[in-house]
Image (cartoon, rainbow, N blue to C red):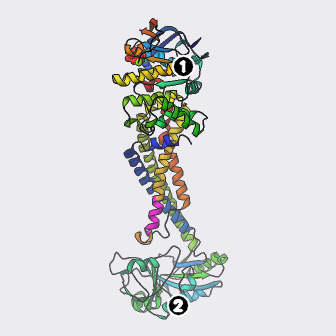
């Protein structure tokens, strides 16, 4: 059964007076527990597609269904609440809040829940343990390396135990070694914690770790490749 | 509140900018608190109700025209008058022209009775009465020139060719007038009668029952209407009402100036707050992506900006309160401001104004942040 169902999705941006079609009728299903890599040339619409799945943008036409809910029909407010419990975000530039330390950054999504302070503490410690940074809890983002920042960001993405994790070029700004660690971590989240991950990447090495690769070009799906044995090394 | 840490950290994330903003707001609210307190001070003085049973009698022609001394006995015959005293404006100074203060020659034996709102210790009053050249001075005046009881003080006349050589015999207490100088009319008269003739500037009448004020005032003026020296009798209340009318204009002026100052603060704070909000576009987009609603973002930002305004307002207002507690404003203003301070009402007014400043200045930037589309906010980064 698929977790994410995209049905004939179109996305058109309006720039000044003329339309810029970005996605032109995309249909795809992502099963629960999948680790999907989205690839394609720059400007092909990868980020746009990811944003639709993550519920921070809405299609011009077509439906986005996640976990049997048609999120493309949700109101702004409903979408925000939905994201809080269902989506974990990982960004290329980590995007931690600079004035908060690692623990406080990871706690942020929990502030929107009804959890008590003690429960929040337990959750964030668990998340930081998963990414191996329990000893860096009181560090501020500027005191961490890029790789460590991205791991804190991953902890923040998983702390609410979301249904789906979206990552837009999570290794795009990292050196090879750190990138490798992040990919290991994502693979582990998928393999050990059964997290559904959708990752946009330019890096074929990163895509190799996924078990399913989609190629986008000029807003249409040009290739879909399933490699169920992927990600076993590392 | 679980968001407190985020708000406080954001508030102080750019320390220099926060410091400058707070300094500016503090300075302006110090200024506004000062203006409002001066107004408050005037109003309190005018509404004090002092001298409710006192009438002043002056020449109907002009204040510079004196009245014959013989009027004193005539006026005293009117029923309902408790006491009548002469009061002469002397206009002398101490040592240098810049050392100027109100100084009067007064009927020494009637002073305590007519001006019963001036408190003089009994022994000092007796000593004053007993010494023909005795003087009674206000506490601020004594403090300003370091005068003590027993000190010899010579004033230099300007209106009259007469330098009163006096000895301080007493220091009075009064709610508002803390820097006047009184000495014996007899001494003044004996030294100036060749020039002034038998005249005095004003008489002051204490009426037994305040209800009779209007009648007595009328009777006095009627008595001299067709004489060479007609009088004009006024109540201190009328005096105060004139004063209040004058304050009315000052009040308008001060209010307008205060509003301008606050408007300026709103504009400057709005610039700072817009900068703060603009810097955080990506962060806000991330928070919204994570699931923070527009309402939550708006609330967080508004709390931050209003807090900034409130801190600035509190710094300025409480700073003013503290400064005017520490600094003797009566001395600094040479007796113009007496019992001056920032009261609770003024503090409350300023704090409310500072909250309004926060809302006005921060409202738009906060709203813009709250409305930000996540995708647009992130596009810079993604
Ligand atoms: N808000 C917008 N307004 C107008 N055009 C937009 C907007 N957002 C994206 N586009 C356009 O849509 C197209 C696809 O953008 P998208 O970010 O999805 O590409 P991408 O595949 O993620 O590229 P990259 O690999 O460079 O990140 C681009 O041509 C872009 O200019
Ligand atoms: Mg992209």
Residue at x 50%, y 11% (from the top left corner): A10
Inspect this view and state whether residue B109 appears.
Answer: no
| Image: B376 above or below A209 | below
- Magenta stretch encompasses residue B235: no
Q: Which residue is mark 1?
A: A194
- Up/down of B118 relative to A89, above or below: below
Residue A66 visible in the snapshot: yes
Q: Position of residue A116 (x, y in %)?
A: 60, 38
Tell whether position B320 is magenta: yes
Q: Is residue B152 left or right of residue A84?
A: left
* Quadrant location, the C terminus of chain A: top left
Chain letter for the residue marked with disc 1 in the picture: A
Q: Residue furthest top?
A: A222
Which residue is depicted at the point 49% across and 75% down? B177
Of B59 and B373, the residue lying toward us: B373
Label 1 residue SS: loop
Q: Both on one chain, marks 2 and 1?
A: no
Which marked residue is nearer to the observer: mark 2 or mark 1?
Answer: 1
- Of A178 and B93, nearer the camera is A178
* Quadrant, the N terminus of chain A: top right
The residue where tag 2 is placed is B123
Q: Quadrant of residue A181?
A: top left
**Relative horizontal placement of residue B174, taking residue B212 as reference (left or right):** left
Give the residues in magenta: B319-328
Q: Position of residue A146 (x, y in %)?
A: 37, 29
């Amino acid at each position: 059964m698929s977790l994410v169902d995209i049905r004939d999705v179109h996305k058109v941006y309006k720039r000044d007076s003329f339309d810029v079609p970005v996605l032109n009728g995309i249909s795809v299903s992502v099963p629960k527990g999948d680790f999907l890599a989205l690839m394609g040339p720059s400007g092909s619409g990868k980020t746009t597609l990811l944003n639709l799945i993550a519920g921070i943008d809405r299609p011009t036409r077509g439906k986005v269904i996640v976990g049997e809910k048609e999120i493309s029909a949700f109101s702004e407010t409903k979408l925000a609440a939905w994201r809080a419990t269902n989506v974990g975000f990982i960004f290329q530039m980590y995007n931690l809040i600079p004035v908060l330390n690692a623990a406080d950054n990871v706690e942020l999504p929990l502030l929107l829940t009804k959890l008590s302070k003690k429960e929040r503490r337990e959750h964030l410690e668990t998340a930081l343990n998963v990414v191996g940074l329990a000893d860096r809890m009181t560090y501020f983002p500027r005191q961490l390396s890029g790789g460590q920042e991205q791991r804190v960001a991953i902890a923040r993405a998983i702390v609410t135990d979301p249904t789906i994790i979206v990552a837009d070029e999570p290794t795009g700004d990292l050196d090879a070694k750190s990138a490798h660690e992040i990919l290991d971590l994502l693979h582990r989240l998928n393999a050990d914690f059964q997290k559904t991950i959708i990752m946009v990447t330019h890096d074929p090495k990163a895509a190799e770790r996924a078990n399913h690769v989609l190629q986008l070009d000029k807003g249409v799906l040009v290739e879909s490749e399933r490699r169920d044995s992927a990600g076993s090394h590392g | 509140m679980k968001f407190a840490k985020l708000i406080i950290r954001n508030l102080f994330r750019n320390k220099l900018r926060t410091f400058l903003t707070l300094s500016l707001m503090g300075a302006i609210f110090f200024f506004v608190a000062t203006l409002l307190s001066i107004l408050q001070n005037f109003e309190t003085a005018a509404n004090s109700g002092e001298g409710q049973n006192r009438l002043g009698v002056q020449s109907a022609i002009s204040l510079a025209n004196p009245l014959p001394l013989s009027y004193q006995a005539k006026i005293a015959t009117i029923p309902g008058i408790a006491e009548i005293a002469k009061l002469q404006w002397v206009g002398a100074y101490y040592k240098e022209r810049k050392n100027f203060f109100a100084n009067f020659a007064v009927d020494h034996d009637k002073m305590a009775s007519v001006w019963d709102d001036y408190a003089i210790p009994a022994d000092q009053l007796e000593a004053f009465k007993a010494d023909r050249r005795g003087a009674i001075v206000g506490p601020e005046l004594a403090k300003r020139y370091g005068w003590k009881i027993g000190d010899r003080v010579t004033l230099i006349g300007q209106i009259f060719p007469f330098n009163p050589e006096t000895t301080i015999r007493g220091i009075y207490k009064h709610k508002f007038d803390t820097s006047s100088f009184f000495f014996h009319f007899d001494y003044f008269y004996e030294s100036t009668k060749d020039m002034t003739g038998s005249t005095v500037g004003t008489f002051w009448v204490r009426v037994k029952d305040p209800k009779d004020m209007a009648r007595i005032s009328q009777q006095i003026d009627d008595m001299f209407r067709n004489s060479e020296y007609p009088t004009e009798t006024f109540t201190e209340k009328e005096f105060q009402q004139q004063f209040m009318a004058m304050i009315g204009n000052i009040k308008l002026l001060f209010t307008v100036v205060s509003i301008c100052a606050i408007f300026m603060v709103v504009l400057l704070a709005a610039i700072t707050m817009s900068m703060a909000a603009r810097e955080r576009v990506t962060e806000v987009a991330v928070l919204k992506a994570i699931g923070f609603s527009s309402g939550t973002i708006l609330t967080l930002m508004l709390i931050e900006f209003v807090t900034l305004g409130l801190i600035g307002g509190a710094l300025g207002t409480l700073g003013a309160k503290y400064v005017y507690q520490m600094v003797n404003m009566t001395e600094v203003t040479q007796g113009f401001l007496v019992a001056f301070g920032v009261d609770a009402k003024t503090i409350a007014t300023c704090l409310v104004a500072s909250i309004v400043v926060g809302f006005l200045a921060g409202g738009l930037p906060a709203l813009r942040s709250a409305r930000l589309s996540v995708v647009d906010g992130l596009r810079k980064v993604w």
